[in-house]
Amino acid sequence: MRRFALLAIAAGASLAATAHAMKPGLWEITTQMSGAGMPAMPAMSDAERKQMEAMGIKMPGAAGGPMSVVVKHCVTKEQAEKRQPPQSDEDRRQRCEQKDVKTSGNTVTWKIECSGEQKMTGTGSITYQGEESYKGESTFNMQDAKRGPTTMKQNYSGKWLATSCK
C-alpha cells in the first residue's frame, strides 16, 4: 500500500510540471488520498516516519481514512523552460508512461500506465492558478494479488515556496 501511495504521489507531482509555465524552484505539493479497496495505512514506527520525512514526505494522521501527504519537490529552470516533468525513481522502477497529455487553457489532462511490478492505470487533471499554484485530481486503478481491485482517488494542490531548492 505504501509503495502504491508513493507511486501515485510521484506521478501526480511529475505531471504538475507539464505544459503550463511554472516558476522554477521549491514547490510544496499536498495530496489527499482515499479509495475503495485501500487498506488503512499501518501505524509507522518513529524510524519509519523519520525515513519518510528524510525523503520530504510528511504523513500526518495516516491511520485510517483519507491520508494526507505533503512533499517538497524541486523544479529546475531547465525543467520549467522545457515544461517536462522530472521522472521519479519510482516512476522509472514501475515503468510508468504518461499518455494522451492534453492542454486546454490553464488545464492539463492525462492518462498514465505503469507496467512494472505494481501495474496501474489512471487519469487526472491539473488547473493552474498562475505560475505559483495549481490544484488537481486524479484516479488510479490497480489489481492487487492480495486485495483484488483497488481504486485510489487523489486531490492535490501545489504552491511555489522559494527560488532555491536548498
Image (tube, rainbow, N blue to C red):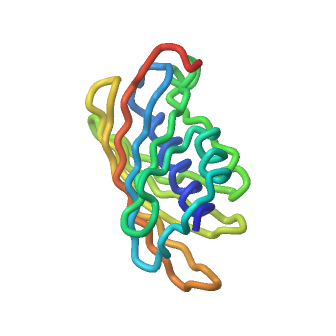
Image-based side of 105 in relation to 29, left or right: left
User: Which residue occupies 55% across, 27% down?
Assistant: 74
Image-based side of 113 in relation to 19, left or right: right
Q: Quadrant of residue 82?
A: top right
Percent x, y of residue 130: 28, 25
Whether residue 164 is situated above or below residue 31 in the rendered picture: above
Percent x, y of residue 152: 44, 67
Q: Quadrant of residue 6?
A: bottom right
Depth check, front residue: 97 or 118: 118
User: Which residue occupies 69% across, 58% down?
Assistant: 94
Whether residue 128 can be seen here? yes
Report the number of numbered marks. Answer: 0
Q: Quadrant of residue 147?
A: bottom right
Whether residue 138 can be seen here? no
User: Which residue occupies 70% across, 45% down?
Assistant: 89
Percent x, y of residue 118: 65, 68
Whether residue 29 is situated above or below residue 117 in the rendered picture: above
Q: Which residue in the rendered view is the most extreme toward the front? A: 46
Q: Which residue in the rendered view is the most extreme toward the top? A: 163
Depth check, front residue: 160 or 41: 41
Q: Could you tell me which quadrant the C terminus lies in?
A: top right
Q: Could you tell me which quadrant the N terminus lies in?
A: bottom right
User: Which residue occupies 67% across, 65% down?
Assistant: 115
Whether residue 161 is situated above or below residue 142 in the rendered picture: above
Percent x, y of residue 22: 41, 25
Depth check, front residue: 64 or 155: 64
